[in-house]
Amino acid sequence: YSASLRELADAGRVWDEETLDAYLKNPKDIVPKGRMAFASLKKSEDRDDVIAYLKQFNPDGTKKP
């Protein structure tokens, strides 16, 4: 992970649905010093789809039944 993401984790940032939605909408709002090239997902439906996709998996990466 980048230093910027580690700083957020050290500060107690948790990647819940609300934070992920905000990041996908405007990454610089969540990771101001981030250098990853990601424009954003402006449509809320697109962000909802990404979050729904990720919710199909367990923390270890296996797919939920």
Image (tube, rainbow, N blue to C red):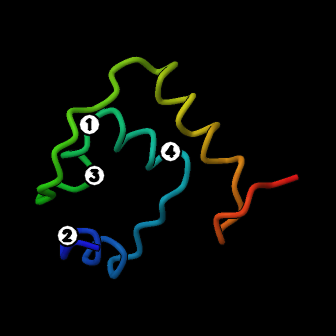
Cα separation, mark 3 vs mark 2, equals: 10 Å
Q: Are marks 3 and 4 in contact (CB under 8 Å)?
A: no
Say which amino acid is labelled 3: Ile
* Residue kind at label 2, given as amino acid type: Ser
At a point 33% along the width and 32% down the height, the residue shown is: 25
Q: Is residue 23 above or below residue 45?
A: below
Q: Which mark is residue 30?
A: 3
Q: Which residue is mark 2?
A: 4
Crowding near the residue tagged with mark 3, few <14, some 14–19, many ≥20 C-alpha atoms within 10 Å: some
In the image: residue 62, left or right of residue 15: right
N-terminal-most mark, 2 or 4:
2
Q: Which residue is mark 1?
A: 26
Which residue is at 60% across, 47% downward? 54
Where residue 62 sits, quadrant-wise, is: bottom right
Label 1 neighbourhood size at 10 Å, few (<14), some (14-19), many (20+)?
some
Q: Which mark is residue 18?
A: 4
